[in-house]
Image (cartoon, rainbow, N blue to C red):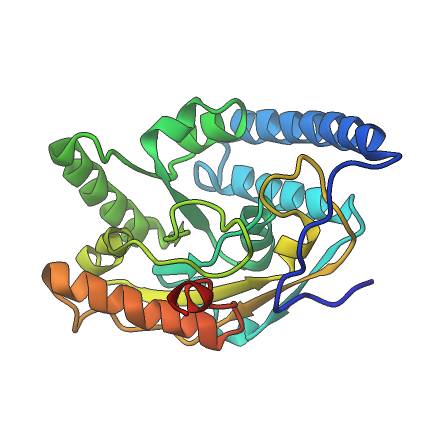
Amino acid sequence: MIAAEVHPLPPRSEKGRFALVRKVAFGWVSFFHTMFFFVLATLTLPLPPRPGRTSFWIVKLWSRLIIGMTGCRVRIEGAERWKPDESRMIVANHCSWYDPPAVWQSFPGQCRFVLKQELTKVPFIGWYAGWAGHFLLDRANPREGMALMKRAIERAHKYRLSPVVFPEGTRSPDGGLKALRAGAFQLAMSGKMAVQPVAILGTYAIWPKGFTYTRRCAEIVVRVGEPIDTTPYKGSRGRKELAAVVRQALIDLGVPDGLADESD
């Protein structure tokens, strides 16, 4: 098994002798695997001990299997820094579809992703996210967006949920860390939550953006950083300062700086 790539490898072409076979096989297996688990997770949402808890553990099992079926595994570094009984915003880099399953598999408590409201239209995963109480934000309607954020903060503290956000906004095309959107940190600042920086290393080498199937078997390293207190940061300027601090924390954890080459 290949160790996690701190500096991502250039992607190979999808063209090749068995490219079509691999694409079809991976597509069908992952589709039915995902459909089964997310239908099951949706059906178990109302079950005790608390609505959504049983369902969440089913999703964690899905994440473990979807990664494991390609021969990959997840190794966690700094697991002692997790505080599953405390609401913290988990902030991670994003360069692969394997990043969310890696977070789900690694975090020992209850977490929910911060998503754009329109993503709830995506079959299975999106539908489940809308019904399972993930943190939905409406950027098109500021007033509704503020109301959604207020409800998200109340729910996070009440049930000790940790929001997960990928503040780059989209997957990095080369594995390097791009600029972080300052607005992504408003939820943590308004909710007085610490930010937990998390570096996800190795997923770009496994399944980079632009590929329809995994390109290699490798180890994924989830490296948990020290929490960052958000209380000193206020207003628009504070969001930008916090974004810069968190970005540097991710780079210090091993994520390649995707802006270094652009500034040369």
Image location (x, y in percent) of residue 158:
29, 50
Q: Is residue 202 above or below residue 150?
A: below
Which is more toward the observer, 46 or 237?
237
Identify which residue is drawn at 63% across, 55% down.
203
Whether residue 46 is visible? no
Q: Is residue 174 above or below residue 31?
A: below
Which is more toward the observer, 69 or 10?
10
Identify which residue is drawn at 41% across, 59% down.
90
Identify which residue is drawn at 51% across, 60% down.
176
How many numbered markers are drawn? 0
Image location (x, y in percent) of residue 185:
26, 56
Quadrant the N terminus occupies: bottom right
Q: Is residue 19 above or below residue 170?
A: above
Image location (x, y in percent) of residue 6:
62, 69
Whether residue 152 is visible? yes
Identify which residue is drawn at 74% across, 68% down.
3
Going by the image, does 6 lie left or right of 134? Answer: right
Image location (x, y in percent) of residue 215:
75, 46
Going by the image, does 17 lie left or right of 186? Answer: right
Going by the image, does 238 lie left or right of 28? Answer: left
Q: Is residue 195 above or below residue 17?
A: below
- Residue 14 falls in image quadrant: top right
Quadrant the C terminus occupies: bottom left
User: Which residue is most to the front?
Assistant: 264
Which is more toward the observer, 57 or 257?
257
